[in-house]
Image (tube, grey):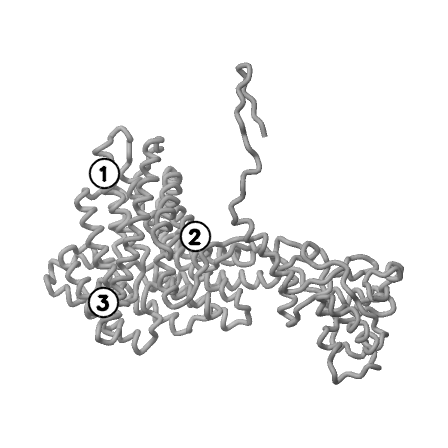
Amino acid sequence: MPEHHRAQSSTTESLTVSPALDLVAESAQTPAQYAPIDRRVLKLCVGAAGIGACAAMIAQALLALITLTTNLAFYGRLSLAEAAPAGAVERLGAWVILVPVAGGIIVGLMARYGSKAIRGHGIPEAMEQVLTNESRIPARITFLKPLSAAIAIGTGGPFGAEGPIIATGSALGSLVGQIMPSTAAERKTLLAAGAAAGMAATFGSPVAAVLLAIELLLFEYRPRSIIPVALAAVTADGVRMAFVGMAPMFPMPNLAQPAGAALAVYVGVGALMGVAAAVVTRILYVIEDAFERLPIHWMWWPAIGAVVVGVVGYLAPDTLGVGYHNITGVLSNQLTTGAMLALAGAKFVSWSVSLGSGTSGGTMAPLFTIGGALGGALGAGIAWLAPAAQVDVRITALVGMAAIFAGASRAMLACAVFAFETTLQPVGLLPLLGGCASAYLTSSLLMRNSLMTEKIERRGIRAPAEYMADVMDQVFVRDVASKDPVSLRAEDALGQVRAWLAAHGPGTSHQGFPVLNERGVLVGILTRRELLDPQRRDDQVLSAMIARLPRYVYEDTTVRQAANHMVNHNIGRLPVVRRGPMPTVVGMITRSDILSVFQRHVADAQRQPPTIRLRRLVAGGKQSTET
């Protein structure tokens, strides 16, 4: 092949490129440089803070609506005074069973004629919208979800208010993202900001709310998403404090520093909670499957599930309604071992059947109650059997509360921090971290999907299980691009190039060729198909065949930027240019080169033989190490 077909010819080294031409190439032809923070992030932060404030107000309104519904349904009065359904059981007797049934009928009608999306506890539904619908949640969910939840919980449903509030905050964030011009990634950030704000506004746990958003909704950790979510959570918690103050959600007596033996016990309790989380998840979906087989319309399922809620509530009144006082009682060791076991069993039956029926409710408060009661009962038993271990029943209850949800949701860090923020007991942090980690481990060994992802996995939606650094963002183009590409001169005739292809082309795998002008500057790319197009005449000059500005990347560009550049412009190859006053084409990168990056990613997961071997040699009474 003639020398002028090489991009790095001897004449190219002496060429100069005008600054204007280089500026145009820099701004229009290379991939945009990624900026972790830009002005768009500032706008997102303002919007997220507004969403946080609105979500906090919605949370207070929902709590008031639940109280109003409870007073009306169980006491027959219009009042916003605090009232628990358990206090009306003795007065109503067996008639109390009908109250949850009435609520189930209303929720079923709302789901049937309003939106089916109000069914369930909200987080899997939000995950589904993030993964499949570019974070677009129907606007009507913003008011239908809290209204249906207020009716379900206010009529005795065994749920906490946090699940519906999180779902409502998600819908609000998505709505704002749909109203304002935004990308799918920005809508996801706003959706997660609304969810985090809802949780912070309920429990006063902004850090845990941000971690929950990362682990269950964002599926990433980067500045442009985490900062708006954090500001939304802080704003929501600030608004909450204006209403209820700064007291912890679940106050408990100060804890003593755990000893080594006790710490091992707490980690073991967490592992058992992971087993319990797997059991709870499987039973819940067995119940859901049972309802799916009923020969009646799903609109009536919440009412059927409410019958169980009413019966259990009549026998164990504390299972009715939100029941945050149950968590406080368990964490303060105010219940006997038998009472804690009875509470855990009754709450589980009531909650699992009701949620499995498709009513509107949450999972956090019920699981906290169940896990806390089980953990407290385990701690009491261990303290009786092995007093020397100095196990604190309150800490086992705290670990049980956080660990069962960590095992069920796989949000390990969020659960550990949540238990600290809602109790303000720093001594519990170490047991919490160990317990939540062991719960995560055992539940992952026992079930592939979590309580949150099983539902959407059944619909054929794959939820991310690991959040890893982008391997393509860690490799530069120069590491994978082919070197010294064959180039063409813009002034050559097509016939001349075809003759060269006929003589030398079959031996090369090149499918695209950079075209350089007389100064060696890249002016375009021509593919083999374009060069061999029979409709083009042999006397046509190559420069006349170039229809668009060339797209290229620098050799120090990341492979991720190159891949994005290809996708944005629908091209399969890019010239690689070396920076400098005389930019030179030094390579070509193709889709195949980009895929080759994943070879090292796969290799990282392969087991390798040891590269260092240690042998203990005993000679003359001395020990040495040989590599």
Instruction: Determine the CA span between mark 3 and mark 1.
Output: 42 Å
Position above or below: 104 against 244: below
Instruction: For residue 238, say whether it is visible.
Output: no
Marks 2 and 1: CB-CB under 8 Å?
no
Which element is circle 2 on? helix
Instruction: Determine the CA span between mark 3 and mark 2.
Output: 33 Å
Residue at the spot of label 2: 206
Query: Which quadrant holds the C terminus?
Result: top right
Q: Nearer the viewer, residue 526 or 92?
A: 526
Residue at the spot of label 3: 78
Question: Label 1 sits on what residue type?
Answer: Ala
Q: Nearer the viewer, residue 188 or 133?
A: 133
Residue 460 as seen in the image, left or right of residue 103: right
Q: Nearer the viewer, residue 454 or 168?
A: 454
What is the quadrant of residue 320 in the picture?
A: bottom left
Question: Label 3 sits on what residue type?
Answer: Leu
Find residue 108 and name its label. Answer: none
- The structure residue drawn at horizontal position 56% and vertical position 22%, both measured from the top left corner, is 624
Which element is circle 3 on? loop
Question: Label 2 sits on what residue type?
Answer: Pro
From the image, state whether disc 3 or disc 1 is nearer to you.
1
Q: Residue furthest toward the bottom?
A: 535
Q: Residue 206: percent from the left, percent from the top?
A: 43, 52
- First in residue order: circle 3 vs circle 2: 3
Instruction: For residue 625, say whether it is visible.
Output: yes
From the image, state whether disc 3 or disc 2 is nearer to you.
2
Residue 37 as seen in the image, left or right of residue 193: right
Query: Which quadrant holds the N terminus?
Result: bottom right
Q: Residue 291: percent from the left, percent from the top?
A: 24, 68
Residue at the spot of label 1: 380
- The structure residue drawn at horizontal position 48% and vertical position 58%, both measured from the top left corner, is 219
Q: Residue 258: percent from the left, percent from the top?
A: 34, 33
